[in-house]
Image (tube, rainbow, N blue to C red):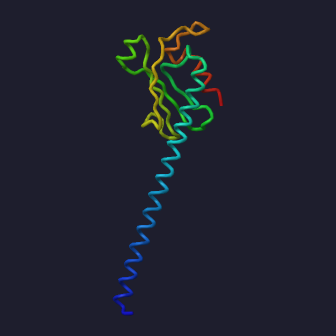
Amino acid sequence: MTLVEVLAGSALLGILLVAIVVANARLTAQTRRAADHVEAAEAAEGLLQYLWMDRDAFPRTGGGDVPGHPGWSWRAMRIDNADVATLGGEAVSVEVFSPGESNQVPSARVELALPPAKKNRQGLDPNTATSNPAITRATAWQ
């Protein structure tokens, strides 16, 4: 073997090694993002199941911590939807945020068509975050 062949082989081996390291880093990052998406979907599903137990008190606005998912938070807000309004309902968006992403891009978002808000058992309007027992219950339930 000549020195040129050894240098060429070493260069090819170096290029191959760099490609493997870069591919591994991308795979690790993609795996982490996929795991976050799975947890966001699970968190959103669990939150919606819990809040849906008392449909009349389902929050139209507000937010808090996601029960059973430390560091995760959620936010509910009304959205404009002419089709839902025509039916007499309200469109609400529920967003779930991963730890450290509060008020940024949500990890999961679910839009719901809800019947018009009713007064709950305590006579409070669930349209306001401060008077909604479901928000307090969801925040405290952990």
Query: Residue 15 occupies which quadrant of the picture?
Result: bottom left
Whether 125 is drawn above or below 30: the answer is above
User: Among all residues in the image, which is located at the extreme right?
Assistant: 142
Residue 100 horizontal side relative to residue 1, left or right: right
Image quarter of residue 13: bottom left
> Which residue appears at 39% of the width and 21% of the height?
79
In which quadrant is the N terminus drawn? bottom left
Depth check: 73 or 112 in front? 112
The residue lying at 39 percent from left, 82 percent from top is: 9
Where is 4 relative to 26, above or below? below
Residue at x-position 61% and y-position 20%: 53
Q: Quadrant of the C terminus?
A: top right
**In the foreground, 88 or 28:** 88
Q: Is residue 31 above or below residue 42?
A: below
Q: Is residue 5 above or below residue 75?
A: below
On screen, residue 82 versus residue 129, left or right, reads left
User: Residue 121's spot in the image, x, y percent?
Assistant: 61, 8
Camera-side residue of 138 and 46: 46
Q: Quadrant of residue 3?
A: bottom left
Q: Position of residue 114 (x, y in %)?
A: 48, 17
Question: How many numbered marks, from 0 up?
Answer: 0
